[in-house]
Amino acid sequence: MIKFGTGGWRAVIGYDFTCENIRLVAAGILALAREESKTGKPIIIGYDRRFLSESAAKWVAEVLAEGGIEVWFLNRSAPTPLIMHTVKDKDLHYGIEITASHNPASYNGIKLFVDEGRDAPLEVTERIEQLIEGIKNVEFADFDKAVDEGKVVYLHSPFNKFLDDIIDLLDMKALRERGLRVLFDTMHGSGAYPLQVILYTARCTVDTINLNKDAYFGGQMPAPSEKTLANLSNMVIRGGYDFGIAMDGDGDRLGIVDKNGRYINANEILCMLYYYLVKYKGWKGGVVRNLATTHMLDKIAESFGEKCYEVPVGFKYISSKIDEVDAVLGGESSGGLTVRGHIHGKDSVYAASLFAEMVSVTGKSPTELMDELEEKFGKHTMVEDNLVFAPERKPEINEIIMVEKKLPDFGTEITRVNYEDGCKVYFADDSFVICRFSGTEPLLRIFAESSDGTAAEKYIADYKAFLNI
């Protein structure tokens, strides 16, 4: 069964992510395009550096080409934000990226983007799933022959407009005058080239690690976490860099390491960038976060007379709300963010560039900026845990959490409970805990935030004991 999650369709290579299923997904997208009368424009296909990504991209192209849709195919791996940008910039109906983003190396997947370069909404992916069920035979062309016949067209300079648009949004003068020294951990991903170009254009000194293609991502998860960036942290200190940057496998999640080796998490990045854009650049507007992201953003927004908007997990909800309320910025604690006036999805290339601008303009290190925020708005410590459970227990766990709506005894005053996406419990002291099933992996994710990390850890322990996991 092919099921889309919050970040597209993802599956284990060789088990569900197979040539047959990849072509089925492509056939489902083709059927949708026909149903919506959107076959008259090309579909752009990109791919990251995972095992099987380029081959999978060609299998998708073969199905679309045989179905009469022109395919724009990249001549090299590329990050997800580039595909979203191209769909928006060229006014295409659809774009596709072959990636499993930050998932383990054993996974791969397909992300679908629709008009304006947005993540495909739930109703679109559900319709594709329905269409796939009715497909009996999948017809496909030969890739090389499709290229010769002009049905598949290679894009040889796909990055130019993407890079130019980001550069136009940056204070390049401040960046050039500052002369930052940056260590970039590309995590063997596809976001390396565009960020290098931007930082070199800004006269930054940039050194890289993990630039080679590695289907196993060096034996680590291709996600910029404190654990996976331990080596980057040590090298930033030893090399005397201003800070270190890391991206996930497809360039839509960001991690930062300060010059003192401190890992700057996604919540802190969001808070710093929102604060910078409003206080230092004079932007007006609120901020958008998902249910599992820091409440410090609420306090920062309130201090400027603005509002923080809470939405379900899934970046499509963030981008839609940004448009609706004209928010400055939106993001999530897993490392993705976007800024008003750019694309409608996560882009770590722009986010990393803007972070470098912030350090250049303020003259403050990330740690100094975060200390300033904590002095103004208090400390907010988030703890998270990913729980593995026996698959047969999922209905039971869902029954307890979402149907019977039972809660552990947290020993703290509860002000309200939100069941919009999983179960989020809000406490009187502005701390919270949220428990929800992952949309991309067979996991139960629990996030908790408090001014005291020990209290946050207790909330998670209470939930684990309550569910016997």
Image (tube, rainbow, N blue to C red):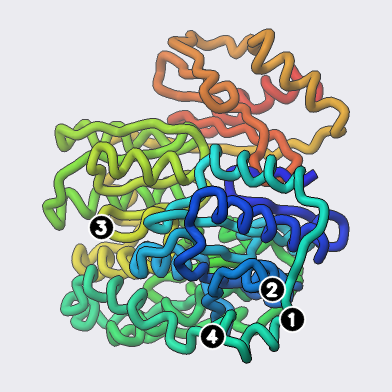
In the shown orientation, is residue 127 left or right of residue 416? right
Residue visible at 15% across and 45% down in the picture: 284
Which residue bears the numbered disc 4? 154
Amino acid carrying label 3: it is Gly
Residue 304 lies left or right of residue 102; in this view the side is left
Q: At label 4, which amino acid type do we have?
A: Tyr
Q: Nearer the viewer, residue 93 or 3?
A: 93
Residue 142's disc number: 1
Q: Position of residue 331 (x, y in %)?
A: 41, 47
Label 4 element class? strand
Q: Which residue is mark 3?
A: 341
The picture quadrant where one finds residue 180 is: bottom left
| For the residues bearing labels 1 and 4, Cβ distance under 8 angstroms | no
Residue under pointer 2:
62
| Residue at mark 3 to residue at mark 2: CA–CA distance | 34 Å
Gap in Å between the C-alphas at discs 1 and 2?
Answer: 6 Å
Whether the residues at callouts 3 and 2 have beta carbons within 8 Å, the answer is no
Separation of residues labelled 1 and 4 (CA atoms)? 15 Å
